[in-house]
Amino acid sequence: MSHPSQLAEPDDAQVAEAVPGRPPRRRARRIVLIVLLVLVLLGVGVIGAGGLYLRSVEGDIERVEAFDQVPEADRPVKAIADATNILILGSDSRDPDNPSGSRSDTIILAHLAQGRSSAQLISIPRDTWVSVPKTKDGQGGQDAKINAAYAWGGIPLMVQTVEKFTQVRIDHVALVDFAGFKDIVDALGGVEIDVAEGFTSTHSLNPDGRRTFVKGRQTMDGAAALDYARERYAFADGDFTRIKHQQQVIKAILDKAVSGGMLTSPGQLNSFLRATADAVTVDETLSIADMAVDMRHLRSENLTFITSPTTGTGQIGAESVVLADTEKAKSFYDAVRRDAVPEILSIGKAK
């Protein structure tokens, strides 16, 4: 299987093409974050006899070895057996900052609490300055932006780096290309987004590369939602606003998928599950079917979006970076490790 960073970005005709049934894997392998969360939230509708169907769908899911090169001796000890931590890595191969597509532009640590009564999605800014461990072939081994770990050592080094930074043990890994937002939003008939402040995207999918968003609540199609979720240059705080917008789009997709009648439409549910299953790339041990059954009572209102504690941006050498709030981050990730949800929410929401 191709390394995720080597996958070619589909052209606009491929992305926009409406394909019945199951789309080719290489074109559709891009929306794992959305798939994971939506399948979990739709789990209540596919348990029982439907669970057998979901397992058949799962047979089409692409797998990747995420932990084979991660030294066990260097990994944090798992503190709470029933809590689960999923590292979700996203890349935007259209991003002008990363023309090679070799870095992970979105890093989310999804913490699924024991009992599955809630989940916290923790966004780690890609420019966060951290210590990157060294690979066996000598890559890394220095302080750098956290997303450099993906370029130097792929998924295993990214796992090592995030575990070293957070001291939280990663149970599973999932991959997503954020261009997949376009497909899934269009499949849902658009999503509702409340734009806090109007702005113009200068890296749009539009032919002239520009798209203007006006303030207020509005329905966005796939192309608009993708432009909204990936723009960073229009904002003074850059990636921080982009993270907020990505979180908005993710929640809007989840809300629309659950409330849009999908559960009561077998044909639509079948088409959605089959199409998105071909889009998933996860580690060797993650079972979507088991997770859907396990988390069948979880709903989008039980999801909390948090940004990893920082003190803002700074300059290290010639690089503009995000500086972690070391003291606050230590307390925050200790709460994640212990599955202390009230503490996670309290620290995560504190300014």
Image: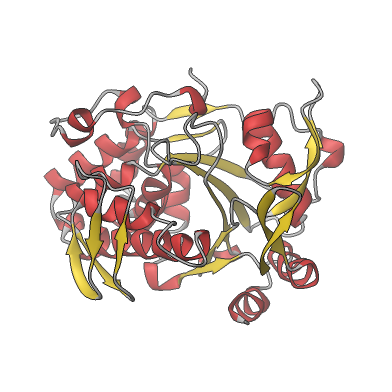
Q: Is residue 3 left or right of residue 272?
A: right
Residues 52 and 343: in front is: 343
Lateral position of residue 167 relative to residue 49, left or right: right
Q: Is residue 320 above or below residue 158?
A: below
Is 265 positioned to the left or the right of 65 in the image?
Answer: left
Horizontal and vertical percent for residue 333?
72, 64
Q: Position of residue 296 (x, y in %)?
A: 40, 59
Q: Which residue lies furthest to the right in this view?
A: 73
- The relative height of residue 44 versus residue 289 in the rendered view (above or below) is below
Whether residue 20 is visible, yes or no, is: yes
Give the position of the C terminus as an image quadrant. Answer: bottom right
> Camera-side residue: 289 or 206?
206
Does residue 39 lie above or below 142 as drawn?
below
Image coords of residue 346 (percent x, y): 63, 81
Residue 327, given in percent of the width and then of the height, sits at 80, 71
| Residue shown at the point (38%, 67%) measured from the top left | 299
Q: In this view, does 133 lie to the left or right of 53?
A: right
Query: What is the residue that sits farthest to the top in this orientation?
Result: 1
| Color style of the picture | secondary structure
- Front residue of 157/293: it is 157
Q: Quadrant of residue 69?
A: top right
Which residue is rendered at x = 28% and y = 48% of the image?
Answer: 204
